[in-house]
Image (tube, rainbow, N blue to C red):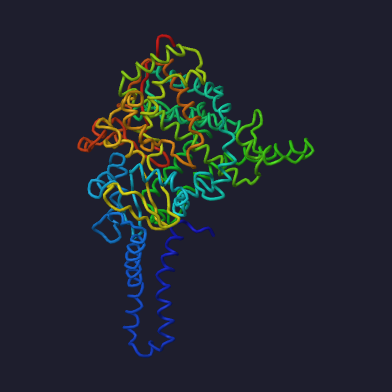
Amino acid sequence: MKLTPGFRLLSNWVLNTLAPCIALAIAAYYFGVLSILPVWQTLLLAAATPPSAFLLGVAYDTLSQRRRAAALGARLVPRVKGRWPGNMDVVIEQAEEVDRDYMGSYFLKLEQKYGKVYNVRYLWDDFIFTTEPSHIKAILASNFGSFVKGEEFNDIFRSVLGTGVFNSDGDMWKFHRSMTRPFFTHDRISHFDTFDTHAETAITAAKDRFRAGHAIDFQDLISRFTLDSATEFLFGSCAHTLHSPLPYPYNAVHTHSPGGLSANGKPNAADILSTAFASAQTSVGRRTNLLGIWPLWEIFKDRTEDDMKVVHEFLEPIIAEAIEKQRVDGLDAGEEKSSGTEKAEVHEGETLLDHLVRLTTDRVILRDEVLNIMIAGRDTTASALTSAVYLLAMYPSAMDRLREEVMSKVGSSRRPTYDDLRNMKYLRAVLNETLRLFPPVPMNLRQTTEDTTLPSPDPERMPLFIPKNTMITYSVALMHRRHDLWGPDADEFDPDRFLDQRLQKYLVPNPFIFLPFNAGPRICLGQQFAYNEMSFMLVRLMQNFSRFELALDALSPDARPPAHWKDIPGRAPIEKFHPRSHLTLYAKGGMWVRMIESEQA
């Protein structure tokens, strides 16, 4: 029988608790202590052994860390001091504030007290949080070998990501990376036929809804667009989620059928897939908030199991068909042996899956890899485009300027080319400013493979000691809004910061302050693909609509920004949506908008 995450954790705790008692009992028996002490004293000693052993272990660990830090000429990272043992109050408060407060606000509170880097020390395990560019540079690039995804990250995400490229280390990561890299060449990512087909379908669906007098959830629409584009690009087999009805606002559902229903009133297959996809990611997002104790919330069932069954049922027939096609093609060609170089080359007309099955026919490896790329291709791009439309609705002058550039470079109807997109400087600035304020992956995790150090934020003090097997979280979202790194207007949306003297003043001297796609050996392979897809869709939107407006009345009340945000520093007081994150950033309750059709369209 397969153990649930919760039972596995409890089993380990029980074994770790009983082990000292058993060792003590054996020792007492061997030395004849059991015949000397009264029974009650023996039982008391046995009961006191586990906590005593644990406390001794904690004390020894602290002393050991001080000694090892001194040997490296470093100091310990400042430790958060909670009210409860093991900082359990900090764990609970953080998990609660993720649901109700503005993104990163709890970490900012700790930062005010402990500085830009601190050790939360959950349940006596080191857990370090940082927003320092020099630390992130070391983690991702200059000291890459000392930081891996690690076992804890793998445990959290294994049920969704498997052993794919985003959840693997060492040789397995290199294998996945080498399989996928050749596919993301300039020639392949600049073919826009797939984008154009699905963009037209999405825009038509939006116009139909607007003409009927309703707002749309742009987050839902663009997630369908990116999923359909990703599945066709990766598999040559589209999920066709754009062909199912769009959802209605919460206050219109009583007069209209909700979106995602087929003619017989049952959810259609495309929406079942999309819903399962999102639900599984929400579950792993909850795990990251709870870290080492997350299995306690999944004692009776793995919360991702049912959702991933739906996703796997969609993927497995596609993978089986690709493997069979490769087998038949091999037989037809007389099963001629290909060299490693020939296998690595991408053939004309191949999808990513076609390419992968020439390198391996292991179904689990294939499924995990295409799922990882599908999540990256769908969710990150959808997140960024959702944020871009939100910001253009918030700042009409930026939209007017962007439309002016689109009309002057492309016109009101022509399909943009790769050269068009490359030459639109303000378009790229809008995307970069969106990615700065709302990076699709706001936080990330790594684990150390050895004792190491990170530079001190205070150059007058010693470096910071990071013990072996320590989890470390870095937040690009909070780093992207630091006033000391980006200037006093860091919380404002201003695409010109990527065009004027501020670019030379802040970013050029310190490029690691802007990392929406990570950096170093694990930098996102699909970075240019994402820029192309986002740019293409924004151009098409500019050609078809002259104004975006936030439909705040269409957003359910429980998803609106709470009143107490007015007292939170930064952007929170002016925000019109509730940013949340699981694997990626998303708008709680959706991003409901109305769009005014352009006269040219």
| 479 and 537: which is toward the camera | 479
Residue 555: quarter of image: top left
Left or right, residue 303 beside residue 483: right
In the figure, 395 relative to 233: above or below?
A: above
In the figure, 489 relative to 331: above or below?
A: above
Residue drawn at 45 percent across, 19 percent down: 423
**Residue 41 position in % (x across, y down):** 31, 83
| 218 and 413: which is toward the camera | 413
In the figure, 29 relative to 536: above or below?
A: below
Residue 62: quarter of image: bottom left
Q: How many marks?
A: 0
The quadrant of the rendering that contains the N terminus is: bottom right
Residue 586 visible in rendering: no
Left or right, residue 44 beside residue 160: left
**Residue 116 position in % (x across, y down):** 29, 46
Residue drawn at 60 percent across, 43 percent down: 366
**Residue 65 position in % (x across, y down):** 35, 62
